[in-house]
Image (cartoon, rainbow, N blue to C red):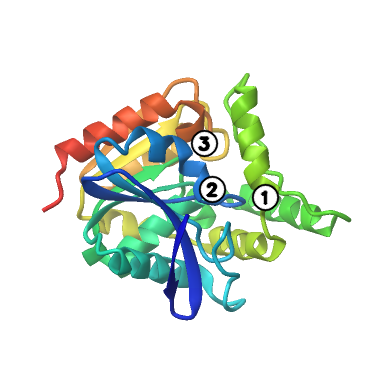
Amino acid sequence: MRSVPLNGIEIAYRQAGSGSPIVFAHGAASDGRHWRPQLEGLAGDLTVVAWDEPGAGRSSDLPAADFGLAGIADTLAGLIEALDLAPAHVGGLSWGGVVAQELYRRRPDVVGTLILADTYAGWKGSLPAAEVEARVAAFHRDLAAPEFKANLPGLFAPDPSPAVVAEVERIMADVRPESMRHTIEAIAACDLRDSLPEIAVPALLVWGEHDARSPPASVARQFHDAIPDSELVLIPGAGHISNLERPELFNAAVRDFCRAHPLS
């Protein structure tokens, strides 16, 4: 673990390897440990950085209740600049993919390519209104329980590896309720549909074929149709967290994409 102070908060991150930089943003109820297979598997080809966003992992708590998606994205831009990585390949899964999109929207100068995995254009931007309402209501029920426990149903493909399930449960056990509230409120209200056609860098779209939370037939297709220079890779045998469920296939897709789109 390493850390860097940014605007009064401490941002923790993991770094491995050498070569062109790739920076990964994790999903909700998670932290940089989510990218363990990429830190291990891509380090022979790339400089791999996985951060703990503000309010997660070993980073500082959120500095303000209204920090929002913009604050998260601006902090990620600050980390990329502080580590002298710009422009970088920038990847994100689920909520992390929303962060990556907002980062590009606000600071395209720090983004060389985008790798968007099992993500959304915000829940409002990709899901039916009734589904968004149901997800928000389920979170508030969990939050009101005597002991809060992050619970995101539909994460895995059928018959998931017990080791992967245990790894995700360990990471989720450390989630901070207020950070989770912040994320759910931000992703539920977010609608980046109109920004997708404005993405002018190469984009790799990686989706688990069994993703029940961000269905590839609708959401991945939305991204592929909207982003001009995009490539869609479906990962067989994977659900919403394709990078952990099928890391070899995920890493191969990322490696091939980065080789095909070297950073200047």
Is there CB contact under 8 Å for labels 2 and 3?
no
**Residue shown at 40%/41% (left/top)?**
39
Q: Nearer the viewer, mark 2 or mark 1?
A: 1
Give 157 or 63, whichever is nearer the viewer: 63
Q: Secondary structure at mark 3?
A: loop
Q: Quadrant of residue 74?
A: bottom left
Question: Pointer 2: what residue?
Answer: 127
Q: Is residue 91 left or right of residue 71?
A: left
Question: Pointer 3: what residue?
Answer: 241
**Residue shown at 60%/70% (left/top)?**
61
* Mark found first going from the N terminus, 2 or 1: 2
Question: Pointer 1: what residue?
Answer: 135
- Disc 3/disc 1 C-alpha distance (Å): 18 Å
Identity of the amino acid at label 1? Answer: Arg
Is there CB contact under 8 Å for labels 2 and 1?
yes
Query: Farthest left residue?
Result: 264
Q: Quadrant of residue 157?
A: top right
Q: Position of residue 193 (x, y in %)?
A: 39, 56
Label 3 CA crowd tier, 10 Å (few <14, some 14–19, many 20+): many
Query: Farthest front residue?
Result: 1
Identity of the amino acid at label 3? Answer: Ile
* Mark found first going from the N terminus, 2 or 3: 2
Q: Which mark is residue 89?
A: none
Q: Position of residue 93 (x, y in %)?
A: 45, 45
Q: Is residue 63 left or right of residue 91?
A: right
- Disc 2/disc 1 C-alpha distance (Å): 11 Å
Q: Position of residue 117 (x, y in %)?
A: 41, 41
Q: Position of residue 170 (x, y in %)?
A: 66, 41
